[in-house]
Structures are given as C-alpha cells and as structure tokens.
Amino acid sequence: MTYLFLSSADHLSFIQAILLGLIQAFTEFLPVSSSGHLVLSQHWLGIKNGGDASFEVAVHLGTLLSILIILRSEVASLVLGMIRSDARSTQWREEMIFIILSAIPAGVIGVLFKDQLENAFGSIQAVSIALMATGLVLLTTFKRSGQRERLKLSDSLWIGIAQAVAILPGISRSGSTISLALWLGIQRERAARLSFLMSLPVIGGAGLLKALDLVQAPLSSAEYQSMIIGMFSSFIFGLAALSIMLKWIAKPSFAYFGFYCLGLGLMIFYFF
C-alpha cells in the first residue's frame, strides 16, 4: 500500500507515475512542452530523481505508441509507400523521406550533447526561459493559415531544426514544428499530423539510446516498475489527448496556448 503514495530516493510511487504519465500525454500533444511540464511536476512533487531522463524517455515512448494507434493509417501508408510504385505511393514515399531527413538535426544534437541535455532536465530557471520562448513563438501564429499540402525538401531542414531545438525542456516540440510549418504556408491540419509523425523516429531514437545506457547501468526493479506504469499511463491518456488535439488544431485557438506558456514561464522565473 505504501508504494501507491510514497516515493523513495530512487523511484516514483504508483500514483506519481500515473500522474506524470497523464501530464506527459496531454502536454505532448498540446503545444506547451511535455518535457518542461514533467520537470516542473517532478520539482513540485518533490521527486528527487528529476534530473534523470529515464522516466521522461519511458513516458515519451508511451505517447509514441498512442501516435501509432491514432495515426495508424498514415503510418501504414508511409511504410507501404516505400515498397509500392504507384502515383499515390510516390507522395507517401516523399513524406517518409521528409520525416527521416527532419529527424537528422535532432539525432545529431541528441548524440553530441546528450549529457548537457540531461542536465537541463534539472534546471527550473532554464525551463522557465524556454517556456517563455515557446509562448512567443506560438503567439506569432495568429491569423497564420497556410493552404499548401505538398512538402518541399527545404521544409524538412527548417522544421527539423525546430524539432532539434525542442529537445530542450520547456521548448514545445509540437508547438515549434507546427508554428514553423504554418509560417512556411503548410495547411493547419496537415502541419499537425506531420508534426506528430515526425516525432516517431526522434522519440524512438531517444528510447534506443536510453535502452543502451540501461544495459550498461541497469536501474533498480522499482525504477523499472515506475517507468512501465508511467509509459502505460501516457499511452492510455495519449489516445484521448491526440484525438482532441487533431480536432483543435484546425481552429485559430492554437495560438492562445502562447499566453499560457508565456504566463507560466514568467511566474516560474520570478517566484521559484
């Protein structure tokens, strides 16, 4: 019964793992930075291992699974597009190439600056500044409504750089990539679906790197248990959150999240 409510120095309680999984699910798909909210939540809950990125990677993998379920038809089309040769498959093949290219900047930064990025997960002040930056970016998307469906090769570079910057906790990955896509003239719902599909290789790659680390330095059984609970929680809640976001993105209210991020960042900067 104690495990339900109390955490120790090396693991989360059952309730904390579920709560953080829920927070990850909704903040991953809303443009408010899931990693930033996880850092803040761990800080406010008094969780001592907030600087370790293992749990963050686990709950991100949970939301990756929810993307695979909700966008299963798009994912299947991307895979089939690589082996078929009809006109429709050509478009999906181009999109798969776009997604792979857009993951390269994040992959390079993630590998080269892995230790520095993990340290950033323990800095509340860094998160507050990043949240304010996210807020300002989102506010620039008012009245931005592109009509373009076809992607350009150069789009993968610019949106990929935006995704790479969003590795920092407090910078929203979906917020930065969707915002830049809107500025490039890409249609709103297309931008959102593209953003979530782009996350698959990045989150999958981060999970693979962390798995390799855990082989060399295994965690305790309690820590693994917390990671599994958090991943399951973020998967279940992620199914609902992604469905809501895909309907929401079609509305201009997407930009209003900028006020939330800006306000939260300012509050944390001055009061914590």
Image (cartoon, helix red, strand yellow):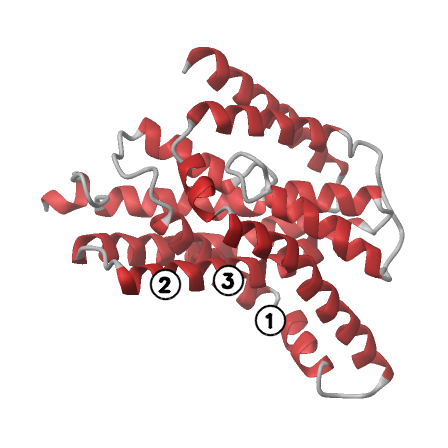
Query: Please, which residue is most extreme toward the front here?
Result: 112
Which residue is rendered at x = 30% and y = 59% of the image? 228
What residue does disc 1 label?
Answer: 72
What residue does disc 3 label?
Answer: 205
> Rounded to the nearest whole Å, what is the CA distance between mark 1 and mark 3?
19 Å
Q: Mark 1 is on which residue type?
A: Arg
Which residue is rendered at x = 23% and y = 52% of the image? 223
Query: Please, which residue is most extreme toward the right here?
Result: 147
Quadrant hosting residue 207 = bottom left
Number of numbered callouts drawn: 3
> Rounded to the nearest whole Å, what is the CA distance between mark 3 and mark 2?
10 Å
Q: Mark 2 is on which residue type?
A: Ala
| Residue closer to the observer: 116 or 183 | 116
Give the crowd class for mark 2: few <14, some 14-19, many >=20 residues within 10 Å.
Answer: some
Comes first in the chain, label 1 or label 2: 1
Query: Please, which residue is most extreme toward the left here?
Result: 1
Name the image quarter holding the C terminus. top left
| Residue closer to the observer: 129 or 250 | 129
Q: Nearer the viewer, mark 1 or mark 2?
A: 2
> Rounded to the nearest whole Å, what is the CA distance between mark 1 and mark 2?
25 Å
Q: Is residue 71 visible?
A: yes
Comes first in the chain, label 3 or label 2: 3
Tell me: 207 left or right of 134: left
Which residue is rendered at x = 45% and y = 45% of the image? 24
- In the rendered image, residue 111, in percent from the top left (x then y), is placed at 51, 54
Q: Mark 3 is on which residue type?
A: Gly
- In the rendered image, residue 167, in percent from the top left (x then y), is placed at 55, 44
What residue does disc 2 label?
Answer: 211
Quadrant hosting residue 265 = top right
Tell me: 140 left or right of 177: right
Tell me: 162 left or right of 110: right
